[in-house]
Image (spheres, helix red, strand yellow):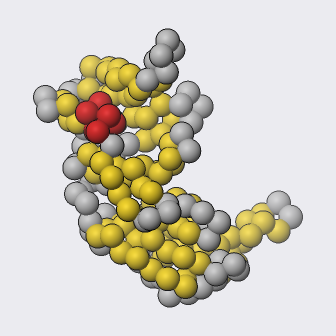
């Protein structure tokens, strides 16, 4: 599956090459970031139109149901991290519950990335290889990793002001 300006498309691998198979009928919202929340459930984040929860048919060709949760802040993205679906925006970090299709603010991750003196811009990036989440504030590059002693998330920062990163 790939997101594009016209919605979501399904690709299939034929031999060594990927090719277009079909678009998801009934959904034409620009889809930069999305995650699977089940076999046939996709959660799409659109920066201005909000979060869209799609239920698809078994062929991934037709949207059967759509739930729009709306916009929760800006500078947002949705992603999978440690078997969870998380949504980040300038309003904080939220946990997406796939069973109820609801968001709940994650107070721990929000406090780690949205320190009132050094808050990130909203978007988070996953580094799967080292199991880290990365964010960028005006003064620092911030990442969260699991503490090797107790396993709790721990905030680390690298002092690199934004004017050096341009």
* Residue at 38% from the left image edge and 42% from the top image edge: 124
Name the image quarter holding the N terminus: bottom right
Q: Quadrant of residue 117?
A: top left
Question: Does residue 150 sit above or below 9 in this rendering?
Answer: above
* Residue at 25% from the left image edge and 60% from the top image edge: 72
Question: Does residue 124 sit above or below 140 in this rendering?
Answer: below
How far across and how far down the image is residue 44, in percent? 44, 66
* Residue at 68% from the left image edge and 70% from the top image edge: 11
Is residue 88 visible in this depiction of the protein? no
How far across and how far down the image is residue 50, in percent? 31, 68
* Residue at 26% from the left image edge and 66% from the top image edge: 71
Name the image quarter holding the C terminus: top left
Would residue 75 be found to the left or right of residue 143 on screen? left
Q: Quadrant of residue 134?
A: top left
How far across and how far down the image is residue 91, in percent? 22, 49
Question: Does residue 68 sit above or below 33 in this rendering?
Answer: below
Question: Does residue 64 sit above or below 164 in this rendering?
Answer: below
User: Going by the picture, which residue comes out furthest to the top?
Assistant: 149
How far across and how far down the image is residue 41, in percent? 56, 69
Would residue 46 be found to the left or right of residue 43 on screen? left
């Amino acid at each position: 599956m790939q997101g594009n300006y016209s919605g979501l498309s399904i690709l299939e691998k034929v031999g060594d090459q990927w090719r277009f198979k079909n678009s998801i009928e009934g959904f034409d919202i620009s889809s930069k970031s999305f995650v699977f929340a089940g076999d046939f459930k996709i959660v799409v984040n659109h920066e201005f139109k909000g979060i869209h929860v799609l239920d698809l048919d078994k062929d991934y060709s037709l949207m059967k149901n759509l739930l729009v949760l709306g916009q929760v802040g800006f500078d947002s993205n949705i992603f999978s991290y440690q078997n969870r679906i998380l949504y980040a925006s300038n309003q904080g970090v939220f946990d997406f519950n796939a069973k109820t299709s609801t968001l709940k603010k994650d107070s721990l991750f929000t406090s780690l990335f949205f320190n009132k003196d050094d808050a990130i811009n909203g978007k988070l990036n996953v580094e799967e290889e080292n199991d880290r989440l990365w964010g960028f504030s005006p003064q620092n590059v911030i990442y969260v990793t699991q503490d090797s002693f107790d396993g709790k998330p721990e905030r680390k920062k690298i002092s690199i002001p934004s004017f050096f990163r341009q």
